[in-house]
Amino acid sequence: MRAARRGGGALRGAMERFGGGAGGYEYGYEVAAAEQLSRQQERHYRLLSELQTLVKALPSSCQQRLSYTTLSDLALALLDGTVFEIVQGLLEIQHLTEKNLYSQRLQLHSEHRGLKQELFHRHKEAQQCCRPHNLPLLRAAQQREMEAVEQRIREEQRMMDEKIVLELDQKVIDQQSTLEKAGVSGFYITTNPQELTLQMNLLELIRKLQQKESEYENAFS
């Protein structure tokens, strides 16, 4: 029994030295929480400082709208790195969409060029086979056909351009909605040109800050 008591006393002593017992565990959690808070505050301060530096490269009209509070809120939203990943994903989707739409427009342009070349060759062959006295009538008919084809081409190009604008506008709305839900200050669905310019600048700030953070992490890894 005495050995057991001595053992118990040693165990209690060890628990006390290493923060054992209910009070010790609570103290340990408090220390860990305080350390985590300190790291978050340090990271927030660093992100805010870097944002303030990056903002200086923006037009003065944009700088005036990015107050200390706005930048502080933005730095806070960027703390855990999730927003960096969201922005990266959104930009990749945007670039893929732009590349796809550009390819579609090039394809349409190629089809139109081929259509006009085919029509030109067909008209030339018809003129070579036409009797001289019928040539004026043939040329007049061919001119009307060429004008109709050109009108069709203009209409198809107009529809393609409208499709491109609508799809790009939708991508902007998707970005605004996603970043608003992620709690990023300054983002909400709008078509106001000034607000869109501000949001574009905010995206650029986030992108540049992500690059600086990557360089910072590599330097200390």
Image: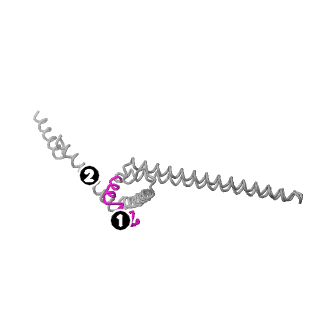
Is residue 70 covered in magenta?
yes
Image-based side of 125 in relation to 219, left or right: right
Q: Which residues are magenta?
A: 50-77
Residue 184 in the image: state x and y as whole percent.
37, 52
Q: Residue type at mark 2: give it.
A: Leu
Where the C terminus falls, by quadrant? bottom left
What is the crowding at mark 2: few (fewer than 14 residues within 10 Å), some, or many (at least 20)? few
Residue 179 in the image: state x and y as whole percent.
41, 50
Q: Residue type at mark 1: give it.
A: Thr
The residue at 21%/49% (across/down) is 31
Residue 192, by quadrant, is bottom left
- The tag on residue 37 is 2
Secondary structure, magenta segment, majority class: helix
Residue 126 in the image: state x and y as whole percent.
84, 56
- The tag on residue 201 is none
Which element carries disc 2, helix, strand or loop? helix
Residue designated by label 1:
53
